[in-house]
Image (cartoon, grey):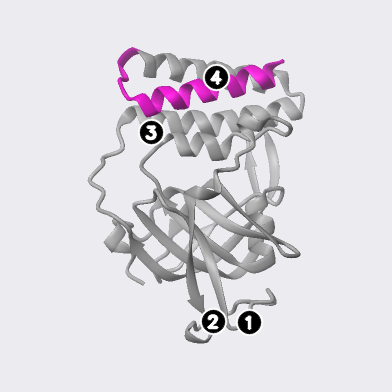
Amino acid sequence: MNLEKLGLKEGLLYEIIATTLNKKGKDITFNSAPMGIRVLENGFIEISPYLSTQTYRNLKENGLISLNLIENVFFYALTALKLENRSNFSGKLNEKLYESKEFNKENIESNLKKNNITKSFSIPYLKNSWGVIFCVAIEEKPIIKKDVLGSSNTAKFLLKPLLVEKIKESHKLINRAENIAIEIIILATRLKVAKKLNNKVMFEKILKEINKKIEYIKRFCKNEDVFKTIKHLQDFINIIKN
């Protein structure tokens, strides 16, 4: 599959929104979450979700995933900052934002594992993506990630692209404010972990870094999507602080 038509280069890391399929009996729901991916030299892709995430559980169950290239940074905040019993922070997107791409198993040379897929299947994706990579997981390896908050169990999935689709032209250049907003989103997820671990020192350290970055953005940014993202972030932080 030619990933370069989406501008993706071998060996580099990219931030995308991963969409997976959750099946419970006859009920089917979609889950989206920001994830980092690495493009490998053989055309495969690596992704490493935490074992506690719905992305991991869905990949483990059926191996199907779409990697969505999204221009609007607000979607990263919506899908990353999740709190139980808070409708504004459910992480769930409206079903109208999704479509599905149909595939025929017989035409695909890959291991679809023991996922109960028969002749055909579909993979959901976000309609507002400018590019999508439809993939199947063909290998899983357990790994342990270490950072300032300690060790976490994750899994490294090797993804095989089934289809690379450019939905629309995108000439948007991610500006500094949007990059910083994504950095803050990642910090906010770590802030939640620090709160759960009752690590007050680390919580205050992360919070200080977040506030510093927010003030930096406010000084020069005029992007409405970034301001919306910052407001969502601040609401999230105010909830977990209390």
Question: In terms of depth relative to the viewer, which is nearer, 106 or 200?
Answer: 106
Q: Which residue is mark 2?
A: 105
User: Sequence-wise, which precedes: disc 3 or disc 1?
Assistant: 1
Q: Position of residue 123 (x, y in %)?
A: 53, 65
Cα distance between the residues tagged 1 and 4:
46 Å
The mark closer to the camera, 3 or 2, is: 2
Name the residue: 56% across, 73% down: 121
- 96 to the left or right of 216: right
Q: CA distance from mark 3 to mark 4?
A: 17 Å
Could you tell whether 195 is left or right of 222 in the image? Answer: right
241 up-or-down from 38: above or below: above
The amino acid sitting under disc 1 is: Thr
Residue on which the image places disc 4: 234
> As drawn, which residue projects farthest toward the front?
96
Q: Are marks 3 and 4 in contact (CB under 8 Å)?
A: no
3 or 4: tag closer to the N-terminus: 3
Is 215 left, or right, of 153 in this rendering?
left
| Quarter residue 148 falls in | top right
Residue at image position (44%, 20%) is 213
Q: Is residue 147 above or below residue 102?
A: above
Q: Amino acid at mark 4?
A: Gln
| Residue in the picture at 41% in, 22% down | 227
